[in-house]
Image (spheres, grey):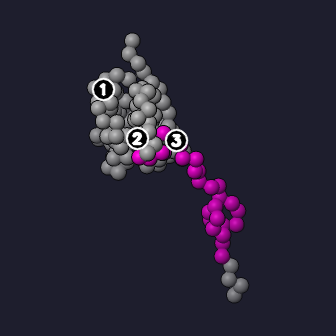
């Protein structure tokens, strides 16, 4: 039986779940090959952990499903799934160190969230101005 690893990644309100299994290097995001993913900036973001992994990425298939959030948040959540999945699949400490050194958010979530809006203004901190004239 072949080895299968399930991982998840989050960024803001985007949640990505993925499976890493032995294969031929196919990566799919929402059933679409990563090469066809658009916009280009998001695609490059998703491909970063694959390029850092090198040969390891060509021996596995990765399927990712992403829901919620915006385009870039989804891309960063998917990228986290790929990085965490490859590290868990290979159990390679050097690969983990390489990811952490390059960009820690590949393996560790970013806790920042948008601040809730308060009364008295249009946003979280902005208040309605008054002029007294």
* Residue in view at x 37 percent, y 30 percent: 62
Residue 108 position within the rendered picture, expressed as x and y whole percent measured from the top left: 52, 41
Report the disc number at residue 59.
1
Count up the numbered dots. Answer: 3
Q: Secondary structure at mark 3?
A: loop
Q: CA distance from mark 1 to mark 2?
A: 19 Å
Q: Hey, which residue is sitting farthest top in the picture?
A: 1
Question: Which residue does the numbered mark 3 point to in the structure image?
Answer: 108
Question: Which residue does the numbered mark 2 point to in the structure image?
Answer: 98
Tell me: 129 left or right of 58. right
* Residue in view at x 48 percent, y 30 percent: 7
Residue contact between numbered discs 3 and 2, judged by CB atoms under 8 Å: no
* Residue in view at x 34 percent, y 27 percent: 61
Residue 1 position within the rendered picture, expressed as x and y whole percent measured from the top left: 39, 12
Q: Secondary structure at mark 1?
A: helix
For the residue carrying disc 3, how many other residues have a C-alpha within 10 Å: few (<14), some (14-19), or many (20+)? Answer: few
**Sequence-earlier tag: 3 or 2:** 2
Q: CA distance from mark 3 to mark 2?
A: 13 Å
Q: Which residues are magenta?
A: 102-129
Magenta region's main secondary structure? loop
Q: Secondary structure at mark 2?
A: helix
Residue 25 position within the rendered picture, expressed as x and y whole percent measured from the top left: 29, 29
Tell me: 132 left or right of 102. right
Q: Which is more toward the observer, 131 or 9?
A: 9
């Amino acid at each position: 039986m072949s080895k299968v690893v399930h991982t998840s990644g989050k960024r803001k309100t985007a949640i990505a779940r993925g499976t890493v299994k032995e294969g031929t290097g196919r990566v799919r995001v929402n059933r679409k090959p990563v090469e066809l993913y658009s916009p280009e900036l998001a695609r490059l973001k998703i491909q970063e952990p694959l390029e850092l992994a090198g040969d390891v990425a060509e021996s596995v298939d990765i399927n990712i499903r992403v829901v919620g959030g915006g385009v870039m948040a989804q891309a960063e959540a998917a990228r986290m799934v790929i990085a965490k999945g490859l590290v868990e699949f290979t159990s390679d400490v050097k690969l983990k160190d390489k990811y952490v050194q390059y960009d820690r958010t590949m393996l560790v979530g970013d806790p920042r969230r948008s601040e809730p809006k308060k009364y008295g203004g249009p946003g979280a901190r902005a208040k309605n101005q008054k002029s007294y004239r």
